[in-house]
Amino acid sequence: SVKELENRVIEIKKKFGTRLMIPGHHYQKDEVIQFADVTGDSLKLAQIAQETKDAEYIVFCGVHFMAETADMLTSPYQKVILPDMRAGCSMADMANIKQTEAAWSKLQELFDDTILPLTYVNSSAEIKAFVGKNGGATVTSSNAETMLAWALKQKKRILFLPDQHLGRNTAFKLGIPLNKMAVWDPIEQKLHYDGKREDVAIILWKGHCSVHEKFTVKNIEHIRSKYPDMKIIVHPECTFEVVQMADYSGSTKYIIDTIQNSPKGSKWAIGTEMNLVNRLIQDNPDKEIVSLNPYMCPCLTMNRIDLPHLVWALESIDKGKIINQIIVDESIKEYAVLALNRMLDHSS
Ligand code: 13P
Ligand code: SF4
């Protein structure tokens, strides 16, 4: 029963004490997040992985790329476990290393040595290593502006992987017009742009988040007509049009802080993942909060981590036969950590 599973989590947590840590991303289910020792967005969870020294076992409640990052930022005696290996990220899967290398050589032909690569942390360790090797850094939605500005001080052009929307929204916020942005299509292996080739400053990888793309201009129009005094806040993984029409946009942390700090009686339509929106509704009964898309938008891979999988992972530690350990190859780790550290050094 659920009660039995919950009791097992409590028992094992008690037994291992600080030798065990359960980080939980804000998009995780309540049944899992109730047992998280720390919750955070992808930046905070990476920072915590880097700082934690006691935890020998880190049972990561989030998705695969986050667990890889945690493995790379912890010491060899610390083991990172992902309760369900199927908890991937469809966006991270939109860029593989072969496609990236092919794109890079084509782009070098077009633009010589004028490009610096940046990758959203929502990418494999291999992509992070590629970026690190070529002088670039990772970014998260909370520091994308800082990192893009940092990158543009070094090279004239940026290749931004793998989320075109975060890349476009961030570049536009920094004052770069749309006609200076191009889109690299990894399937066609072709660069698409409207203006002049020599004017291209930002090369956006054609990837997206299938959850955040579900918030549409139609959804915004509906809210504006039905609830004219409702404010709209969205994650920058939403499309450019949606971000432009919304009242506010920002990372998961920004969304949480903005809602929590808003006055009693505030009215919000939120464009981000469903578990987080539901939690914000529960935690803020004095405010009127709805999902921008009335059908709600779950992240199916985040949801793969459920209570039975959490118990399974914890039991494996208790039995001394751990399952699903995430180990990034040493050769990849070296350069990927370089890319991660360039970001962490610029983040508070
Ligand atoms: P943040 O946690 O950086 O806001 O990222 C959102 C996301 O989609 C995580 O997969
Ligand atoms: Fe990936 Fe989007 Fe899910 Fe985040 S919400 S894990 S970006 S698919």
Image: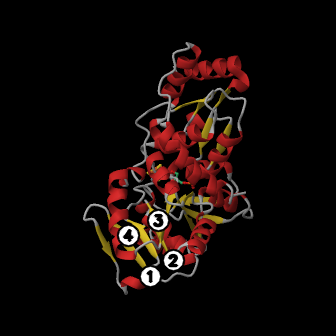
Q: Nearer the viewer, mark 4 or mark 3?
A: 4
Marks 4 and 1, how far apart at CA: 18 Å
Which residue is disc 4 drawn over?
108
- Left or right of residue 149, residue 183 in this image: left
Q: Position of residue 298 (x, y in %)?
A: 45, 49
- Identify the residue at image location x=43%, y=47%: 89
Marks 4 and 2, how far apart at CA: 13 Å
Q: Position of residue 119 (x, y in %)?
A: 49, 58
On the rendered image, what quadrant is the C terminus found in?
A: bottom right
Q: Which mark is residue 48?
A: none
Which residue is disc 3 drawn over?
160
Q: Three-letter amino acid code at disc 2?
A: Lys
Which residue is disc 1 drawn over?
180
Query: In this view of the protein, which residue sits in the foreground, 14 or 294?
Result: 14
Local secondary structure at mark 4 = helix
Local secondary structure at mark 3 = strand
Q: Residues within 10 Å of mark 3 (few under 14, many from 20)?
A: many
Which tag, 4 or 2, sits closer to the chain's start? 4
In contact (CB < 8 Å): disc 1 and disc 3: no
Q: Is residue 92 visible?
A: yes
Marks 1 and 2, how far apart at CA: 11 Å
- Identify the residue at image location x=48%, y=27%: 309
Marks 2 and 3, how far apart at CA: 13 Å
Which residue is disc 2 drawn over?
156
Query: In this view of the protein, which residue sits in the foreground, 303 or 142?
Result: 142
In contact (CB < 8 Å): disc 4 and disc 2: no
Q: Three-letter amino acid code at disc 4?
A: Gln
Local secondary structure at mark 2 = loop
Is the residue at mark 1 in contact range of ligand 1, meaning its CB lies under 8 Å from it?
no
Is the residue at mark 4 in contact range of ligand 2, meaning its CB lies under 8 Å from it?
no
Q: Three-letter amino acid code at disc 1?
A: Lys
In the rendered view, would you say 126 is above or below 191? above
